[in-house]
Amino acid sequence: MKPEIRRAAEILRAGGLVAFPTETVYGLGADASNAKAVARLYATKGRPPDHPVIVHFASADRAFTWASKVPGAARKLAERFWPGPLSLILRRSKLAKDFVTGGQDTVGLRVPSHPVARELLKMFQDGIAAPSANRFGLVSPTTAAHVREDLGAEVDLVLEGGASEVGIESTIVDLSAGSAVLLRPGAISREDLEQALMAKVKEAGGSSPRHSGGLERHYAPRTPARLVPTHDLDKEIEKLKHRVAVLAFSRPDERVDCWLRMPRNPEGYARRLYAALRELDTAGCETILVETPPQAPEWAAVRDRLQRACEA
Ligand code: TXA
Ligand code: MG
């Protein structure tokens, strides 16, 4: 793996694009200090230029050089959760240029824990800009094969790292304006954050900064997907029968050809979610029915992704 990772660092240095595994989802990486490389990254993803990307680092010390102000809360969260599935939004230093921040005066920073990502970041030494390695708006990749399916020849190298352990994107916390605001729920829950900070963490309201994870339709399969409460599932299946694909907690129903059964714990569900949506998307069905997950707080991140993937 080492020579492969060294090659990846050289490609990044030369302005190329490298997809790499992280514990959340696979990222599409570019040298975060190279305007041309980041422009190519945006073009490859089909991402609007005013949407900021998260910059990845090998350590909190390096990450914080990209911030002009590092509040105590940021240090606390970094100490507790980095390396890991957390991104922090802070006021940017001069190192974070407009082309990674979408022109905002804040920057998204993350120190991932996946061993391949860590090795790459250590070798590269600087910041790697990396959105999820999928086309804009579609389901994020959790394996190297997903990345090849989505972006194939447009990426210079795809590093292998197995299936992503967490399975959904990092928790994003905005600390740029004083109090902590949760911009995107993830494996690290609001309760985890509040415990570490010993302070309240607000949910993002309508006036939070631009972030594409906040767009309504996002992480979506091409086949229309719909959330259905458990007690309506049977009725909906009866209407559509073999024309539906189903993602549910219960056992497969014989009327449905394509049925994926999901774990009843939120960690297991999150880990399987994107691969499952991709699989159901290729089943050639009219609709994907998704059984609504529980309302409990530990399901918040899964509910968030499902609400974005589904039309209603
Ligand atoms: O788990 C993850 O965070 C993955 C892996 C690859 O690290 N990355 C990821 O990146 O999900 P992306 O670009 O697909 O989503 C990053 C989110 C976007 O919604 C982006 O707009 C937001 O972070 N973001 C980045 N910088 C921001 C900033 N300065 N202010 C507000 N939102 C920001
Ligand atoms: Mg994304």
Image (cartoon, rainbow, N blue to C red):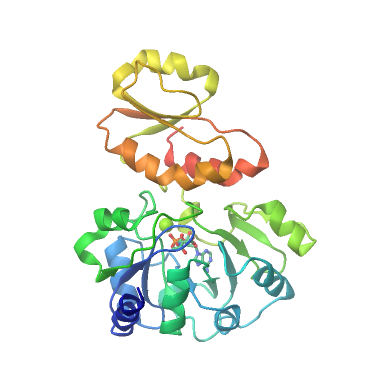
Residue visible at 43% across and 30% down? Answer: 226
In the image, residue 156 above or below residue 203:
below
Of 172 and 278, nearer the camera is 278
Answer left or right for 73 relative to 127.
right
Answer left or right for 194 relative to 294.
right
Locate the N terminus by quadrant.
bottom left
Residue visible at 49% across and 52% down? Answer: 168
In the image, residue 6 above or below residue 305:
below
Quadrant of residue 131 within the rendered picture: bottom left
In the image, residue 161 above or below residue 76:
above
Of 274 and 143, nearer the camera is 143
Coordinates of residue 32 in the picture (x, y in percent): 41, 78
Of 13 and 143, nearer the camera is 143
Coordinates of residue 196 in the picture (x, y in percent): 74, 62
Count all numbered tags in the image, as a single digit: 0
Coordinates of residue 285 in the picture (x, y in percent): 28, 29
**Residue 87 in sight here:** yes
**Residue 217 in sight here:** no
Coordinates of residue 276 in the picture (x, y in percent): 39, 40
Of 287 and 160, nearer the camera is 160
Residue visible at 65% across and 81% down? Answer: 69
